[in-house]
């Protein structure tokens, strides 16, 4: 008598996480709406846009209609969603591509947030509604050729001249800069004193403001990346962010962005996991699906465990943020751990796909290359290690 193969219940990642029990109906609707949009409008073209270094700016109005630009800000035509809803949106965007999530993160967390928090009422009224609608795209000018992890060492200067400020300096690795209508630029106003750092809104078309594109990237290729070059660039006092002083200004923006990254990278990890699970179930080797092999199952279990741990942690921290009690140490911990998890997941997925793992037909190598950048930006892995080390020991290791 022929023996029938015993079939076992298949448990999904969401089952492991218990995700549906952790989120509200509104958060679920936000997630599902964005997921449907991306499945239709972005994911089918993601490999081509990555390969050809194309950011699909024509999609910006539709992305704005989803309510993801300045999503967790209130007033000024901003959507005003909660922090977990925002995080779930970042997760879905990065499931599609880290470059798309970077665009949304820069627009909302790095550019709209400082105007919302540190700007004048006139600045908020003028810029935030247009930015939420995608009519104005912005970039964040902090990183410099010689000042990456140490922003206090920036060389960009702003000198007062009557009712204006004259800016000179250069920023690099600036997401959105080639297409930006507005730049949030950070500069020192008094010698080398980091306490004199101020934020300025520099508009496209201002003389002395240029944004050359950076080419030949092997990561975040579907994201517009460029420089900001300021040569006697004159901006009015009305374009200075009046509430921002010292490093607290830019660092507060980075904390907002890091929170979104911690959610977002889970999406990249899930894309790698989903691809690998399906591949190993379909791929036959030695007469059976590769998924039947114990070493393959071990890797899949490790991937699923890392994703589950990351998701539960970041939703917990999202609830803390909604209560106003999330600290920079929480953000450093979850950004550091989740990005490391996502990168290791992508590398494992690449290995399980074998030679197919390096082909752009599969999203794994694209996510792996993108995550190498995410591992570095918004505070490197090592910087977040030192932030946490200082918090735990009271000793400064910088």
Image: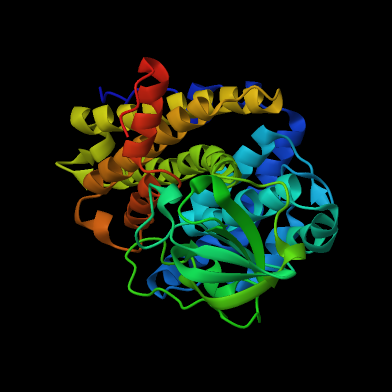
Q: Quadrant of the N terminus?
A: top left
- 204 over 153 or under it: above or below: below
| Residue 283 or residue 87, whichever sits in front | 87
Q: Which of the 4 quarters of the picture holds residue 145? A: bottom left
Query: Residue 59, percent across and down?
Result: 65, 68
Residue positioned 26% across, 32% down in the render: 299
Query: Residue 287, percent across and down?
Result: 18, 41
Q: Is residue 26 left or right of residue 266?
A: right
The total number of labels drawn is 0
Q: Is residue 32 left or right of residue 16?
A: right
* Residue positioned most to the left: 286
| Residue 14 or residue 366, whichever sits in front | 366
Q: Quadrant of the C terminus?
A: top left
Query: Residue 381, percent across and down?
Result: 34, 39
Q: Is residue 304 visible?
A: no
Residue positioned 42% across, 67% down in the render: 50
Residue positioned 36% across, 16% down in the render: 393
Query: Residue 321, percent across and down?
Result: 65, 28
- 71 over 297 or under it: above or below: below
Q: Is residue 357 visible?
A: yes
């Amino acid at each position: 008598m022929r023996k029938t193969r015993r079939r076992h219940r298949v448990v999904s990642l969401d089952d492991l996480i218990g995700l549906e029990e952790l989120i509200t109906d509104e958060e679920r609707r936000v997630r599902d709406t964005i997921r449907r949009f991306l499945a239709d409008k972005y994911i089918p073209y993601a490999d081509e846009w990555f390969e050809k270094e194309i950011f699909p700016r024509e999609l910006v109005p539709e992305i704005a209609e989803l309510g993801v630009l300045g999503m967790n800000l209130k007033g000024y035509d901003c959507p005003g969603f909660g922090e977990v809803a925002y995080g779930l949106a970042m997760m879905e965007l990065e499931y599609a591509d880290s470059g798309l999530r970077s665009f949304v993160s820069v627009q909302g967390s790095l550019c709209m947030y400082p105007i919302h928090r540190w700007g004048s009422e006139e600045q908020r009224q003028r810029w935030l509604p247009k930015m939420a609608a995608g009519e104005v795209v912005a970039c964040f000018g902090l990183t410099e050729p010689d000042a990456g992890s140490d922003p206090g060492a920036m060389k960009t200067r702003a000198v007062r001249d009557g009712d204006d400020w004259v800016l000179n300096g250069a920023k690099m690795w600036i997401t959105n800069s080639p297409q930006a209508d507005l730049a949030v630029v950070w500069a020192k106003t008094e010698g080398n004193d980091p306490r004199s750092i101020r934020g300025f809104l520099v508009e496209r078309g201002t003389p002395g403001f240029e944004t050359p594109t950076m080419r030949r990237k092997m990561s975040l290729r579907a994201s517009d990346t460029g420089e900001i070059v300021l040569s006697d660039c004159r901006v009015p006092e009305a374009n200075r962010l009046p509430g921002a002083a010292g490093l607290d200004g830019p660092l507060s923006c980075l904390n907002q962005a890091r929170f979104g990254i911690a959610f977002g990278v889970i999406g990249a990890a899930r894309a790698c996991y989903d691809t690998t699970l399906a591949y190993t179930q379909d791929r036959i080797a030695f007469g059976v699906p590769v998924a039947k092999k114990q070493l393959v199952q071990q890797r899949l279990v490790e991937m699923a465990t890392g994703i589950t741990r990351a998701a539960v942690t970041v939703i917990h921290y999202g609830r803390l943020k909604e209560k106003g009690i999330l600290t920079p140490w929480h953000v450093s911990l979850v950004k550091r751990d989740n990005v490391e998890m996502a990168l290791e997941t992508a590398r494992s997925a690449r290995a399980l796909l074998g030679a197919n793992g390096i082909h752009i037909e599969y999203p794994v190598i694209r996510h792996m290359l993108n995550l190498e950048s995410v591992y570095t930006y918004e505070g490197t892995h090592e910087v977040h290690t030192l932030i946490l080390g200082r918090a735990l020991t009271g000793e400064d290791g910088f």
